[in-house]
Amino acid sequence: VTAASASVEHFAPSNIALCKYWGKRDQALNLPVNASLSISLDYLGSFTRVEPVENGVDEVWLNGHQLLPSSRFSQKVSAFIDLFRRDQDLHFKVDTRNNIPTAAGLASSASGFAALTLAMNDALALDLPPEHLSVMARMGSGSACRSLFTGFVEWEMGVREDGLDSHGVQLEQTWPGFCIGLVEIDAGEKATDSRSGMQRTVETAHLYQSWPLQAAADLSKLQQAIAERDFELLGQTAEQNALSMHATMIASWPPLLYWQPESVAAMQKVWQLRAQGMQVYFTMDAGPNLKLLFQQHDRAELLQHFPTLETVEPFGN
Ligand code: PMV
């Protein structure tokens, strides 16, 4: 295989899990303990440009700044490119730009690795089918395998040891009025990344034993909610799933608590709005920020309670 194009650029959306991926059954291949389900964020994500370079090392740029080759992110990107170039002496400049409001506190590794997968596929003229691209993206960051697709996406855990059947599958593509709101509590980098957080939970929390059961039950409830456009079932399931995941983190040792006091205050505000009859729910990942799930007709009122809310309509309006 030879580098085919001078420069290629691809986009991939960010995604938010409604049923979370938490725990690996294989550390090296990023194979999950449980299947997960997410929603892709339409135009919010990463643009990644790849071009061959002659100087014998990869060059990694993020949002307009070149990173040191020794930085953790550069190393991760280079190791990921190794999967594509194998033992060929090919090096690349990788330039990633995220259009996710940096203050929204949304992880960009999923969209970044998905866009890089698409770009490498083009740069090396590999012509891989979508499922295989999703498998490759998974190797960069587990949740990236879901960012290869739009709308609702399920990550099937698969049964094979080589992981070739563990990838994203596109589900329903439309739900008019479905909205997501990003509540930024803290945009700073998290102290414990998801890889080490998962590992600690799996190794030290007895409570983790119940997680695969919770995730399996939630996955089928979400599939039903999506098929029937049952927003209440979807919201309840997603919120309970996120809190169950966080319960396993808190039950780890040393304890892993991603929440800030402001996170809890925001949760209580959501519960208060629900008590007043609004259908609004939240989900959270390995960080202090909340992602709200609500419907278009509640947007104006919700903004009065969360004035800085960044809102996205994943299926357009
Ligand atoms: O893809 P990773 O390794 O960054 O893990 C993502 C983990 C969560 O965001 C907490 C859950 C998920 O399914 O996205």
Image: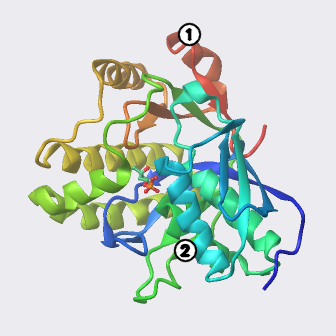
Is residue 182 or residue 90 the one in the foreground? 90
| Residue 96 vertical placement versus 226 (above, below) | above
Q: Residues within 10 Å of mark 1 (few under 14, many from 20)?
A: few
Indicate the secondary structure of the residue bearing disc 1: helix
Residue under label 1? 304
Kind of element beneath mark 2? strand
Quarter of the C terminus within the rendering: top right
- Residue 52 makes an appearance in the image: yes
Looking at numbered disc 1 in the image, what kind of residue is underneath it? Gln
Which numbered dot is residue 167? 2
Q: Quadrant of the N terminus?
A: bottom right
Q: Where residue 144 sits: x, y (%)?
A: 56, 60
Query: Is residue 16 visible in the rendered structure shown here?
Result: no
Q: Amino acid at mark 2?
A: His
Q: At 12% from the left edge and 57% from the top edge, which residue is drawn?
A: 204
Q: Nearer the viewer, residue 129 or 214?
A: 129
